[in-house]
Image (cartoon, helix red, strand yellow):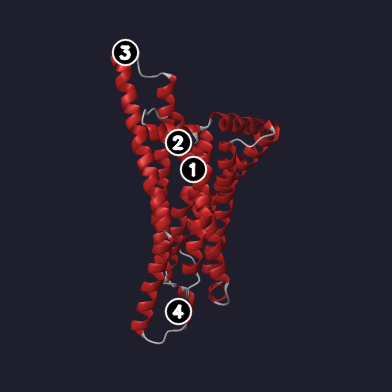
Amino acid sequence: MLSTVEGLLIYVAVSESVLGVLGNGFIGVVSCIDCVKSKKIPTVSLILTGLASSRFCLIWIIITDAYVRMFFPDTYLSGNLSQNIAHFWIIMNQSSIWFATSLNIFYFLKIANYSHCIFLWLKGHINRVLLLFMGSLLISWLFAFPSIAKPSINDIMKNRSSTWLIALHKREYLTNHILLNIGVILVFVLCLITCFLLITSLWRHNRKMQLNATGFRDPSTEAHIKAMKTLVSFIILFILYFVGTAIQISSSTMPENNLLLIIGITTRLLYPCGHSLILILGNRKLKQDFLRVLKPLKCWGKEKLLRIP
């Protein structure tokens, strides 16, 4: 029987899931429609489609894993279900983070102003750089799958031979997950560097505008601030996602603690849900299409209220 706190957290997690599925679905559909209309595949549309698709699947994997683990623990422990879920989670998790970082790099190269030859070369070959970066995603999968193929925590819990052996296997399980996230941590460091360089570019641009006495709210400054908000929100939400993942991994060593598991899930879902909504509100095209979709829904809601006696 679930406690009141657990029930409330589950309600929050379900709400986050619904918003995340709808938000990512909307981004994916709009990006695909733009590609069909333009009869070509722009780099940003490719990134947004990949990002929305991977996050859409990631949300379903997180919810499915939590649902089976909480309500059907015997099924989760038997067979290869947990390992199959782990495989799908690795693919979608790394894809989501890689596409999000590619989007951050795209904003940085398009908006930042530097005269260094390396930056100018990257800016001139932005499509090649992004394709090469996304291609490295396939290499990361090759390193990830051998690690996840090792015995899972569920296999360990079924073979409780001695206390010291269980502790040893739990440490090995946690070490495997840390190794799996090394690539993700490196990508996160790249995001931090990109954000720092963008802030530096904004500071230099503002100082230049001060010297010219032309004010601060020019189009370049607006673009800098908008891109910086997107980057900072990604970093904050990704930190929460990483914390939630650590909490959920820790809950695997304590199967009887459902509250810890639910807290981890609720924290993890903030990232794929919240960042997608921020992208919709921060992108002029996505925001316009989103408001266009909401307009008939709002009219339908008002008509329904008027019909109520």
- Residue behind mark 2: 122
- Residue behind mark 3: 212
- Residue 62 visible in the displayed image: no
Nearer-the-camera pick, 243 or 197: 197
| Residue 81 sits in quarter | bottom right
Left or right of 221: which side holds 146?
right
- Residue behind mark 1: 102
The first of marks 4 and 1 along the sequence is: 1
How much space separates mark 2 and mark 4, taking CA atoms? 50 Å
Residue 224 image offset from top left, x and y in percent: 41, 28
Label 4 Cα neighbours within 10 Å, binned few <14 / some 14-19 / many ≥20: some
How much space separates mark 4 and mark 1, taking CA atoms? 39 Å
**SS at circle 3:** helix
The first of marks 4 and 3 along the sequence is: 4
Which dot, 4 or 1, sits closer to the camera?
Answer: 1
| Residue 199 sits in quarter | top left
**SS at circle 4:** helix
Label 2 Cα neighbours within 10 Å, binned few <14 / some 14-19 / many ≥20: some
- Residue behind mark 4: 157
How much space separates mark 4 and mark 3, taking CA atoms? 68 Å
Determine whether 217 is above or below 188 in the image. above
**SS at circle 2:** helix
**SS at circle 1:** helix
Determine whether 201 is above or below 142 in the image. above
